[in-house]
Image: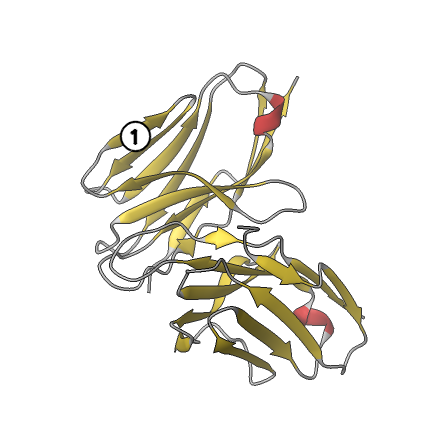
Amino acid sequence: GENVEQHPSTLSVQEGDSAVIKCTYSDSASNYFPWYKQELGKGPQLIIDIRSNVGEKKDQRIAVTLNKTAKHFSLHITETQPEDSAVYFCAASIGGGSYIPTFGRGTSLIVHP
Amino acid sequence: DAGVIQSPRHEVTEMGQEVTLRCKPISGHNSLFWYRQTMMRGLELLIYFNNNVPIDDSGMPEDRFSAKMPNASFSTLKIQPSEPRDSAVYFCASSLQPGTNTEAFFGQGTRLTVV
């Protein structure tokens, strides 16, 4: 089955700095890569996703990049704010049939004011 | 829509007792997932239903765990008998499948503590 590795496990930045979280996946058939944000006491919530036919996608301060050859994808957050502090999960899945996301272990992002 | 609704939010039980977690998916969604979250193992998929039918239960850790989906608007995850190592946060998620990579919407989770 699919295996998703995520790094780092914790990331501490100053407000205004950029944050980068990296993930690798094992199954070359995976073609959908969502990113979830989990705030304390809540369930994960989708913040951005990317499909295999796209190399990069942006949404305001958030961007994702995908390198299918190397089987890795990354989340970039620019101009970080304290409210960005949360646990971020990457996931990979194989579309075309049943979509079952396999999650990375998560990255705890702390943004210091 | 109120989103995915899970109950209870917190459950504390004694070892050996039966525990039942409940989930109401988003109306119109035909796929439902149960996940377990721990510090050690992260988010683990336990079971996946599509159109009320269990499709993949390979993540169910032991026979003590069972899940049902009697209709499109309700699912249960039961642990019997419960053990301290079952302590975790259990999430239910739903989505609209198949054929497209659609978002999985998560509930607030049930924090289970087995003492």
Q: Is residue A89 above or below residue B114?
A: above
Q: Position of residue A19 (x, y in %)?
A: 48, 25
Q: Is residue A96 left or right of residue B91?
A: left
Q: In the rendered image, which residue does mark 1 sit on?
A: A57
Q: Residue at x 62, y 78 (%)?
A: B78
Say which chain tag 1 marks. A
Amino acid, disc 1: Lys
Q: Position of residue A81 (x, y in %)?
A: 57, 20
**Quarter-of-image position of residue B61:** bottom right
**B94 shown above or below A16:** below
Q: Quick check: B81 left or right of A94? A: right
At 54% from the left and 14% from the top, the residue drawn is A16
| Colour convention | secondary structure
Task: Give percent across and percent down for residue B87.
Answer: 69, 66
Nearest the eye: B58 or A23: B58
Quarter holding residue A84 = top right
Q: Secondary structure at mark 1?
A: strand
- What residue do we see at 73% from left, 72% from top? B84
Near mark 1 (Cα within 10 A), the count class, few <14, some 14-19 or many ≥20, is: some
> Up-down: is B4 above or below A56?
below
Please state, as top left, top right, bottom left or bottom right, where the N terminus of chain A lies in the image.
bottom left
Q: Quick one: A14 or A47, which is closer to the camera?
A: A47
Q: Is residue B42 left or right of residue B102?
A: right
Q: In this view, which residue lies farthest toward the top?
A: A16
Q: How many marks?
A: 1
Write down the quadrant of residue B75 in the picture: bottom right
x, y percent for residue B28: 42, 60
Q: Residue at x 22, y 59 (%)?
A: A96
Q: Quadrant of the C terminus of chain A?
A: top right
